[in-house]
Amino acid sequence: MRREYTSWLAAIVKMGHKVRRDNSRMFCRNRWAKKLLFIALFGLAGCSEAPDAGQPAANQAAQNQPVVPQPDAAQSSDEVFIAGPDFVTTVTISVPKEATVGEWVDLKASRKDGPWLRVKNADVPSGVKTYSKEPPSSQANIQSSVAWNIDPPGAARGNLPTDDIVKDDPLARKVMFSAPGQYKISCASSVPTKTMSNVETITIQAKP
């Protein structure tokens, strides 16, 4: 009976040692597993933070890039305007129908022209005048930039652009007649092409 008890106790002690060894192994395994898990998590955190750390430098590099102006889509830098194949200029004048000797008569003129053609600067024919911007198709009050003609000559006197006249109205042009009669008035414009205006007739009466 005592021998059986001793054998039974020895078996229990042996089982206890085995349990302790198994628990120790389990503890070691758990400890290494925790270490490996910590290292893996630390590596993942480092990888996820790397792009963020470089992002400010990338943004700074993008901000330091020079801004290159984009060309105008409507007109490139090597394009100009010239008179098109069907280009027409019309100059129209207007004057009073009657006036009196010694009276200043106002002269008015306007111009319409077009169409304008946009071409490459390299394609402009020799001798053709070019414009960097498209000129206006209609212009009023051009009487100061045209050459006036009066027929018959000799009795008409135009106002000279003195300081007082320019200060009062720089675009004004006037004519005065020294003798009664009928006179034909016209003008010639050289911009953009040489063009003659319509002809108007004025009747000058003698002083009462």
Image (spheres, helix red, strand yellow):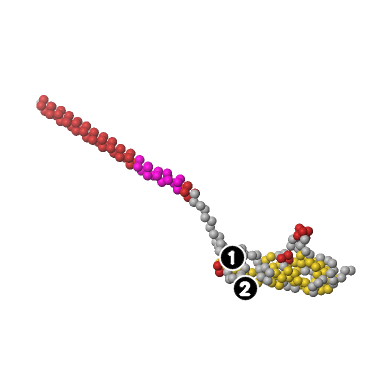
Q: x and y percent of residue 28 in the render?
A: 26, 35
Q: x and y percent of residue 100 in the render?
A: 84, 68
In this rendering, is residue 165 above or below 51? below
Point 19% across, 31% down: residue: 17
Q: Quadrant of the N terminus?
A: top left
Under circle 2, the secondary element is strand
- In magenta segment, residue 43: yes
Question: Which three-letter amino acid code belongs to the residue tagged 2?
Answer: Asp
Quadrant assignment, res 119: bottom right
Quadrant assignment, res 99: bottom right
Nearest to the observer: residue 67 or residue 12 = 67
In this rendering, is residue 46 above or below 96? above
First to last magenta residue range? 42-58
Tell me if residue 104 can be seen.
Answer: yes
Circle nearer the viewer, 2 or 1: 1
Tell me if residue 116 can be seen.
Answer: no
Q: x and y percent of residue 5 in the render?
A: 13, 27
Q: Which residue is mark 2?
A: 86
Q: Which residue is mark 1?
A: 80
For marks 2 and 1, give the CA distance.
Answer: 17 Å
Point 78% across, 59% down: residue: 164
Quadrant assignment, res 79: bottom right
- Tell whether 20 sits left or right of 151: left
In this rendering, is residue 68 above or below 4? below
Nearest to the observer: residue 181 or residue 55 = 181
Q: x and y percent of residue 62 in the render?
A: 48, 50
Which comes before the other along the chain, label 2 or label 1? 1
